[in-house]
Structures are given as C-alpha cells and as structure tokens.
Image: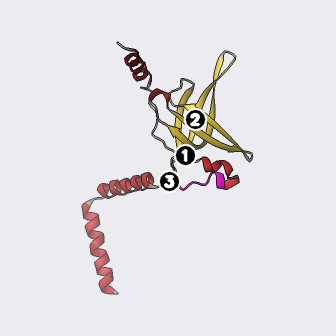
Amino acid sequence: MGKVDKMKLVEAMNVKKENPKFGVGDTVRVMTKIPEGDKIRLHPVEGVVIARRDAGIKSVFTVRKVSFGEGAERVFPLYSPNIERIEVVRRGKVKRAKLYYLRQKVGKRATKIEEDKTEKLAQLAQRRADKKAAMPVEKTEEKKAEKKAEKKDK
C-alpha cells in the first residue's frame, strides 16, 4: 500500500460527516465548539458564504459577518471536529463563485443578496397538490357546477 493510497483511505474515513448542501451566497449559521474550562460551549457564527473550496477532506468555506458596521470573515474547514453543525438560514442566488466584492460594501448593501426561491416554490406547489388530493372529488365537481350556474345567472 503506497503513501497515496493510505492518504485516500484516511480521507475517506473522515469525510463521512454529514453536512447540509450549501453554496456561495447562502446565509449559514455555523455552531462552533469553544472550550471554556472543563465545559464546551457552542458559539454561533452567522453570515454569508463568500467562498468555498472543495478538496475532499481539505474543503473549506469562508463566512462573512457584519457586526456593528464592522465586517469579519472566518474560514472554516468543512470537516473540522470543532464544528458541531451547519444550518442554512437562507439560500442566495448569485452569479459568481467568489463574493470578495462584498468586502468593499458597507451596511445593507454588504448583505443584500437575492434570495433563491426555487425551493420555496417547490414546497408551495407540493402543499397545494396535497390539499387538492385531500379534497373530496364530489365537492370539486359541485363547486364547478355552482360557478357555471353563477356565470349563467349574470
């Protein structure tokens, strides 16, 4: 077994951690473990993902957070044991792979990214389909007949 094979084996064992699918432009909340004495505290970091590099176990993503008018960026290794979980707060719709131009933006412009509504629309369509399936067929036929009668009366 060569050196490269051993590295791939170790990488495959550690990459098994489940993370949600997120990309550049998404607003995420990263819960990081911070040791305080003998206890471990979870510290949330919420911000926009401005960069992501996928490289197996060495994958990293950069989160930019604007706090009290001051921008702060933090680079997280995706498979770090210090990350408890990653929550996607909002999906963003962007046309670039890296959002470094947000560093020059101040205030609301620094976080203004168009929201990706494809998932919300799919969920809404699913709910409507479920409602329609739950409604008895007889009632829908009766409603159609009532509407036709109303149109004839007018």
- Crowding at dot 1, Cα within 10 Å, few <14 / some 14-19 / many 20+, comes out as some
Q: Amino acid at mark 2?
A: Val
> Could you say which is closer to the camera, residue 107 or residue 88?
107
Residue tagged 1: 98
Q: CA distance from mark 1 to mark 3?
A: 9 Å
First of labels 1, 2 by sequence position: 2
Rendered location of residue 136, percent (x, y): 27, 59
Could you tell me what secondary structure mostly forms the magenta stretch? loop
Q: Residue at x 63, y 42 (%)?
A: 64
Rendered location of residue 15, percent (x, y): 43, 26
Residue tagged 2: 30
Residue tagged 3: 95
Compared across the picture, whether 149 is left or right of 64 comes to: left
Please tell me whether mark 1 sits on a helix, a strand or a loop. Answer: loop
For the record, the magenta segment spans: 109-115
Q: Amino acid at mark 1?
A: Lys
- Give the label, 3 or 2, closer to the camera: 3
